Image (cartoon, grey):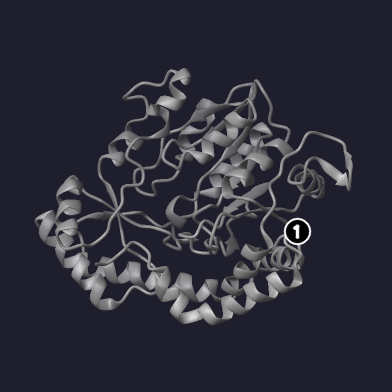
Amino acid sequence: MIPMLDLKRELADIGDEISKAVDKSIGETKFILGPSVKEFEKNAADYLGCKYTAGVASGTDALHLALKASGVKEGDEVITTPFTFIATAEAIVYCGAKPVFVDIDPETMNINPELLEKNITENTKAIIPVHLFGNPCKMDEIKQIADKYNLLIIEDCAQSFGATYKDEQTGILGDIGCFSFFPSKNLGCYGDGGLISTNNEKIYNDIMALRNHGSYEKYYHDRIGFNSRLDDIQAAILNVKIKYIDIANEDRILAAEKYKDIMQNCVSYQKVEDKSKHVYHQFTIRSEKRNQIMSELQKHEIASAIYYPVPLHLQKSFASLNYKEGDLPVSEKLSKEVLSLPINPYLEDEEITIISEIVKLAAGK
């Protein structure tokens, strides 16, 4: 059996260090916004190269609070991709705003900047580019359009911790970055967790209040806020794991290169721009024989996953937006062809070879 991600191998490697960090957090008994949270916020800010970070309860909350702090409200429109996890668009709806879906580039699988401008209206407030599977978006093009129309850029970095664009970290390329630390992520905790990054002091202060019941000063609540705070125990785990994130990401990149070397051109891969570093939260292939490949892998007890089988514009939850099949053809086509294969820092060369040979055979090449 080869799983998508084997956290037991991670525990065998750094589990003792994590256990000590958790024990220390428990021993300090400061579980809400405790010292581990403050330490992780500093570590993350130093790593990303930004002035401010705020730990929150999840990646979804990071997006929601970022939008709220940016002033996104009912009647506003926010442009994003339909080829992403639903949280990206849910956060827009939480603010009473309308998601506007723009189709993707078939090679990068990210939002297509060439299609942005024609979707901008007088109600457009922000753009949420998603660095899908750890592959940075074409941020120069997106920033140029955002600047032209005075739009905010809120990066969805849920899958891209450590990915870079022109040697800058994702999460500091726009106005705000939003990260998830779900256990499967490149930098993951052992529960839910999230982070917001920004260089804007006002946005940071508003987020710090929003995450803690709208309070800028204890027991004084200037606005209606939320209970969304990164847990101290989870932060303690992240403080250990962030030390190893570059090594872990490099191991993912090496695994992806080995896959490509063996499989060659039997399937298609996500294109990586010359100025980008893809950190392979997922190693995703494209093939018209996707279902046959998945079936063959299952026969050999090898995991695989389809991200995402139904684009957001065709989900029942967004039926009120009145999109129909054929409106965003690239996303719809990819949803029928993509398949993610096991990838993690502990994936062995022999496992990559086994998986690759099965894919080649099933793809008929």
Q: Quadrant of the N terminus?
A: bottom left
Q: Is residue 23 above or below residue 233?
A: below
128 relative to 277 in the view: left or right: right
Q: Quadrant of the C terminus?
A: bottom left
Residue found at x 62% / y 44%:
61
Which amino acid, mark 1? Leu
Residue 345 in view here: no
Q: Is residue 313 above or below residue 263?
A: above
Q: Secondary structure at mark 1?
A: loop
Q: Nearer the viewer, residue 22 or 78?
A: 22
Q: Nearer the viewer, residue 265 or 70?
A: 70
List x then y, in percent, for residue 298: 19, 57
Write down the quadrant of residue 347 in the picture: bottom left
Residue beneath label 1, please?
Answer: 33
List x then y, in percent, for residue 62: 63, 47
Residue found at x 78% / y 49%:
208
Q: Nearer the viewer, residue 59 or 154?
A: 59
Residue 173 in view here: yes
Q: Is residue 179 above or below residue 313?
A: below
